Every structure is written in structure tokens, then in C-alpha cells.
């Protein structure tokens, strides 16, 4: 493919890091350079000659720099079609020089919003000239090269080095595609900033960072992660994260966030907790979580909200698990846990951001608020004659937290600090309860005095009847069935206590 030499360039950038090699190449090839303000000074410091844009337009920068490049001599030089006789004639008539290369980036709008700056400062970071230059140059990619981000400086440098200061049409189309990605991402963040208050019913999502995964849920499915995992985690050991790892990690960190004031540990398989406990140390919490299901823990994702020390590491090292997430690890713990080279160790640096959830569905997308409701004792309404004891109240709070993060239909059985068992993803609540009771007994738990949590109401009293027969003494559920009273009456007749929260926690 033919190489087109670059003879003129317009350069106006916010970020000047790593621009020096490009300036040197343009100087080497005798490229005429136009520039503005701070960029002009930077280029001149590299020993290259620069024509100020003001000299080209015969117009100064005005309104505090809001208008610098918005002029027909600039945009005409970018947009006129070199093979169109009419365009070439008009360019000559109005003394509009061709501009073959545009290097421009955008004011840091996204970063300014994230910094907590004032609205006045944020508005000033909405780029007008830059975004217009990007779109104009990208539109005329047949004749013009557009570099719209510092992330592409290296690509341009490589092209100029290997092609003697020129680019091919294929190169220019590539840079144009990159430019439209930059401009659409920028506009998305501006819209989302304004839409925080306006609530226009439109979904705009843009992620610049993409990571190819080994495969999706199954080997025959390809997959990518879009987002910045490095913002959330430091990976200290192990193989590349997989699609299924990421799904389980998301579930794990959401669950453990429910226990900010306690030392907690959870073990998850397929997004459901097969073990969860609180204790006075990470080691003890792990032991209690592991005891809930010593079979399902194999190959699981482990998470804690406290630093993993040497004692905890020794205790869990013999278990085969995929991932361990913690806010930190002692050096001694790392030495032990790194003994398995594929074991993924993640240091969690921050809480999960965001308040929305998005999912593709049918021929569209559904969006909802995250389930951020967590019930405390103060939210419980006692509906039975017998009220739960203080210890049962603590147990109901614990069970409700685990239940919230378990696949519906679900029943959770626990005491105040340890998950005994759960019935997950069942088509009937009775089946979920029977599954939970069976598992609890299988792993040696005595359910006398245990509590039960349900993610939704009981349409019939059958679940409280089965729970009573198993020894369970207290129940937490949202309520809301037209037959709530039937379950309440059974509890009253059999000395059980029940509280209702008024909040359903389906998880599909």
C-alpha cells in the first residue's frame, strides 16, 4: 500500500510526555509544524521551528483560551479533499495550507470529575477545539493522520520510523478508528456527568481498558473484561484471571463487604457461599467457614476482610483453591501461599465502586440499582408472640447477610457467626430448605437453636413447619405474602420466633 509523506502537522496537546521522539522525527523529515501556547513552547525547546496558529489564522487566542483553533484556515486545511478539484481550488483561493497530521488530546474531564473539583472547573475541562479537530481529521483519514491520545504516540513513532516519515491509508484508517473511540468515550463521560441530575433514560457505557480472557464460561466461548482491575487489586501470585474467576471474585468481595466491623471469611463456589464465618482471627474464621462444606471448598474462591497472617496461611495452604482475596498479606503468609505457583493471590485496594448493574438480555440491555440494602436489628419487625433472644437476633442478622448474596430461591441456616448450610438456586423454597437441612446434617451441624433466613416470603407455612422439626428456633424473612399469618400462627403455636424485614433479596 502506498505511503503518503507527512509534510505539515498541527500539534496541540495537554499531555506532552513521550512526545519528544515524534518531534525529532518530524524535524528530521522537514515537516512544517503549527502549534499553540504551551505546546508551541515545548516544541521550540526541542529545537524545531513552529508556526503559531495565530499566525496562520491572523486571529489571537480569545476568551481565556476557549477559542484558539476554531477557524476555517485550520479546519479547511484538515478537511479539504486532496483529490477533489473544487476543494483544491478553494484551498488555493483562500490561502488554506494542507495539514497532513494532527496530534491533539483532550482536557482531562474524567480525571477532573474524579478529583471532586467544582462544577466550574469541571465545565472548563469540556474540550471544544480538541474534539472538533479529532473528528475533522478522522473524517478525512484518506488524507490526514490523527493521533488523539498520548497512548498512540508510540504507534505513530513506529510508523514514521519504519516508513520514512509517511503513513499508508491502512495506517490512517487505524488512527481514525482510535480517534473516534477517544471522542465517543469522552462524550460518554460528559453525558453521564450531566445525567446524574437530569436522569435522561439513556444508557451510555464506555471502558477504554480491555483484557482478553483465556475463554468465557466454557472453552468454546471467547471473552474480554472491560475495566481497570489494577485499580481494585494487586495480583501478587498466580495465573491469569479467567471469566469464571472474575464472576466469583465479584460475588466474594460483595459478600465480605457486609462485615466491615468483624473479622470475616467466606468460601464461594459458582458465586454462592459454601462457607462463611466471623471470628477473632482470620485463621479461626477460615476454619469455621471451611467446616460448613469441606467438599465444595475444593477449587473455591476465598475472601477475607483482614490481613492474612502466617497462622492463617498455614491453615489454608493444604486446600486447593483458585483465588484468595484479602486487604493485605504478611510477608510470611505470602511465602507460604506462593508455594502453589498457579494460586491467585489478590490484594484488594478499595471497595467496589458504582451503584448500578447492567446485563445484556434478549435484544437489549437491562439496568438496575445494586442491592445495597442490608437489614440490621433495628429493621426487624417481630411478628410472633415470642421475640428472638439477643443471640438469635445476632444470628438472624448474620444469616440475612449471607442469604442476600445467595442465588434464589435460597434458604440459609446459621448461628450468629457461622454458616451451617444453604439451599441455593432451587425452584421451590421447600426444596431449598430441605437441601440446606440435609447439607447441615451431612457436615455434622446440630440445628437445635439454629436460625433460618429466606430471601423471599413464605406463601405457605410448610417451611416453618419443616424448620421447626429440624430444631430451628428463629426465622427472618421479608414478609408480604397474603398468607403471612399462616406462618406466624404456626410459629406462635410452636414457640418459634419470626421477624420480618419488608425487603426482598432475590438474586437471579
Image (cartoon, grey):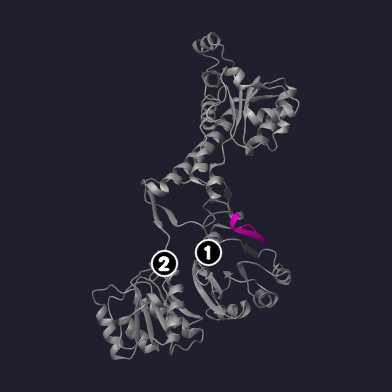
Report whether 333 appears left or right of 390: right
Where's residue 216, x and y in %? 53, 55
Residue shown at 75%/23% (left/top)? Answer: 28
Where's residue 413, x and y in %? 44, 80
Query: On residue 440, which mark appears?
Result: none
Taking depth in this image into account, of 95 and 445 the one nearest to the observer is: 95
Against 468, residue 215 (above or below) is: above
Report whether 268 appears left or right of 309: left
Q: Residue furthest left?
A: 482
Q: Quadrant of the C terminus?
A: bottom left
Magenta span has 233?
A: yes
Q: State which region is magenta.
A: 231-240
N-terminal-most mark, 1 or 2: 1
Identify the residue position indicated by label 2 in the image: 373
Binning the other alpha carbons within 10 Å of mark 2 as few (below 14), some (14 to 19) or many (20 upward) gives few
Of circles 1 and 2, which is in front? Answer: 2
> Quick check: can you spot residue 411?
yes
Magenta span has 249?
A: no
Taking depth in this image into account, of 444 and 33 the one nearest to the observer is: 33
Taking depth in this image into account, of 232 and 472 the one nearest to the observer is: 232
Residue shown at 68%/78% (left/top)? Answer: 311
> How far apart are labels 1 and 2 at the CA level?
21 Å
Report whether 190 appears left or right of 484: right
Where's residue 397, x and y in %? 44, 77
Against 90, residue 470 (above or below) is: below
Q: Quadrant of residue 372?
A: bottom left
Where's residue 281, x and y in %? 62, 79
Element assignment for label 2: loop
Binning the other alpha carbons within 10 Å of mark 1 as few (below 14), some (14 to 19) or many (20 upward) gives many
Amino acid at each position: 500500500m502506498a505511503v503518503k509523506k507527512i509534510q505539515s502537522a498541527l500539534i496541540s496537546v495537554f499531555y506532552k510526555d513521550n512526545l519528544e521522539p515524534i518531534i525529532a522525527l518530524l524535524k528530521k523529515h522537514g515537516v512544517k509544524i503549527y502549534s499553540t501556547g504551551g505546546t508551541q513552547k515545548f516544541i521550540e525547546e526541542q529545537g524545531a521551528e513552529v508556526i503559531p496558529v495565530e499566525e496562520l489564522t491572523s486571529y489571537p487566542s480569545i476568551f481565556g483560551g476557549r477559542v484558539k483553533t476554531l477557524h476555517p484556515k485550520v479546519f479547511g486545511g484538515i478537511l479539504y479533499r486532496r483529490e477533489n478539484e473544487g476543494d483544491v481550488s478553494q484551498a488555493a483561493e483562500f490561502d488554506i495550507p494542507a495539514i497532513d497530521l494532527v496530534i491533539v488530546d483532550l482536557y482531562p474531564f474524567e480525571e477532573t470529575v474524579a478529583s471532586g473539583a467544582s462544577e466550574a472547573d469541571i465545565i472548563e475541562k469540556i474540550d471544544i477545539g480538541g474534539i472538533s479537530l479529532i473528528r475533522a481529521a478522522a473524517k478525512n483519514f484518506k488524507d490526514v493522520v490523527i493521533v488523539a491520545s498520548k497512548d498512540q504516540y508510540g504507534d505513530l513513532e513506529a510508523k514514521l520510523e519504519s516508513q520514512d516519515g509517511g503513513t499508508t491509508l491502512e495506517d490512517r484508517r487505524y488512527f481514525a478508528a482510535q480517534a473516534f473511540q477517544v471522542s465517543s468515550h469522552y462524550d460518554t463521560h460528559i453525558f453521564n456527568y450531566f445525567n446524574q441530575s437530569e436522569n435522561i433514560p439513556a444508557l451510555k457505557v464506555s471502558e477504554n481498558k480491555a483484557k482478553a480472557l483465556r475463554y468465557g464460561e466454557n472453552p468454546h466461548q471467547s471473552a474480554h473484561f472491560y475495566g481497570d482491575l489494577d485499580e481494585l487489586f494487586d495480583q501478587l501470585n498466580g495465573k491469569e484471571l479467567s471469566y469464571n474467576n472474575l464472576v466469583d471474585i465479584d460475588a466474594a468481595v460483595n459478600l465480605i463487604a457486609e462485615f466491615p466491623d468483624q473479622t470475616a471469611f467466606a468460601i464461594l463456589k459458582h458465586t454462592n457461599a459454601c462457607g462463611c464465618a466471623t471470628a477473632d482471627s482470620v485463621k479461626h474464621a477460615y476454619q469455621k467457614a471451611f467446616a460448613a462444606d469441606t467438599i465444595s471448598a475444593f477449587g473455591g474462591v476465598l475472601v477475607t476482610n483482614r490481613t492474612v497472617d502466617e497462622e492463617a496461611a498455614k491453615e489454608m495452604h493444604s486446600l486447593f483453591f483458585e483465588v484468595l482475596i484479602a486487604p493485605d498479606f504478611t510477608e510470611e503468609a505470602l511465602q507460604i501461599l506462593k508455594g502453589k505457583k498457579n494460586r491467585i493471590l489478590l490484594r484488594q485496594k478499595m471497595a467496589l465502586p458504582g451503584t448500578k448493574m447492567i446485563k445484556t438480555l434478549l435484544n437489549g440491555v437491562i439496568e438496575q440499582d445494586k442491592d445495597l440494602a442490608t437489614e440490621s436489628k433495628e429493621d426487624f419487625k417481630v411478628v410472633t408472640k415470642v421475640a428472638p433472644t439477643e443471640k438469635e437476633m445476632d444470628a438472624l442478622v448474620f444469616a440475612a447477610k449471607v442469604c442476600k448474596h445467595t442465588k434464589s430461591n435460597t434458604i440459609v441456616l446459621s448461628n450468629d457467626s457461622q454458616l451451617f448450610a444453604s439451599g441455593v438456586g432451587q425452584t421451590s423454597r421447600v426444596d431449598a430448605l430441605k437441601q440446606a437441612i440435609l447439607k447441615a446434617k451431612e457436615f455434622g451441624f446440630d440445628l437445635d437453636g439454629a436460625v433460618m433466613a429466606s430471601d423471599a416470603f413464605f406463601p405457605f407455612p410448610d417451611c416453618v413447619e419443616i424448620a421447626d422439626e429440624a430444631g430451628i428456633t428463629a426465622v427472618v424473612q421479608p414478609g408480604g405474602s397474603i398468607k403471612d399469618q399462616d406462618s406466624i400462627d404456626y410459629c406462635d403455636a410452636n414457640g418459634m420466633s419470626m421477624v420480618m424485614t419488608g425487603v426482598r433479596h432475590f438474586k437471579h
